[in-house]
Image (spheres, grey):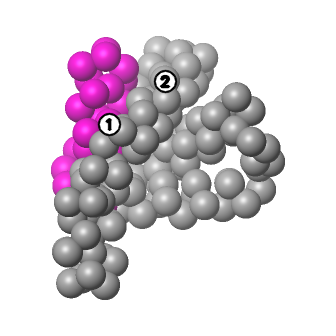
Amino acid sequence: MKNFIVKTLANAGALGVATWILKDITLTGDSFWRETLSLILVALVFGVVNWLVKPVVQLLSFPLFILTLGLITLVVNALMLLLTSWLAGELSLDFHVHGFWTAVLGGLIISIVSWALHLVLPDDE
């Protein structure tokens, strides 16, 4: 359970950094607490998408992974971020990613920040 909370907080932090850096990834709310709650809920959705959908997409794109020497991972991360944005809209969460290239850059930022946070935060099973 602690591992799940740590990963969700790391995802929330990474998504927060991406919304702070990129103007085309938006998280809106009428108060600080509403934005924070939306960010945590979006991090949960992002975690579920990465847990359920991403392994299937990676398996199906394995030949492209070999062909592009791993660069297809940027596209897969962008697609997962766009799917999270769409699901957030369906769940009435105020998180939006505008455009594919914004999603690619956002996915790169989220990957780097998540990696750094996982190094710093405790990870007990």
For residue 96: magenta? yes
Q: Quadrant of the N terminus?
A: top right
Earlier residue among tags 1 and 2: 2
Q: Is residue 57 left or right of residue 25?
A: left
Residue 59 percent across, percent down from the top left: 27, 60
Considering the whole magenta stretch, tell me its main secondary structure: helix
Three-letter amino acid code at the position of disc 2: Leu
Q: Is residue 91 visible?
A: yes
For the record, the magenta segment spans: 80-104
- How many residues crowd mark 1 within 10 Å: few (<14), some (14–19), many (20+)? many
Q: Is residue 125 above or below residue 73?
A: above
Q: Whole-percent x and y of residue 71?
A: 30, 76
Q: Secondary structure at mark 1?
A: helix
The residue labelled by disc 1 is: 84
**Disc 2 target residue:** 41
Q: Is residue 43 left or right of residue 13?
A: left
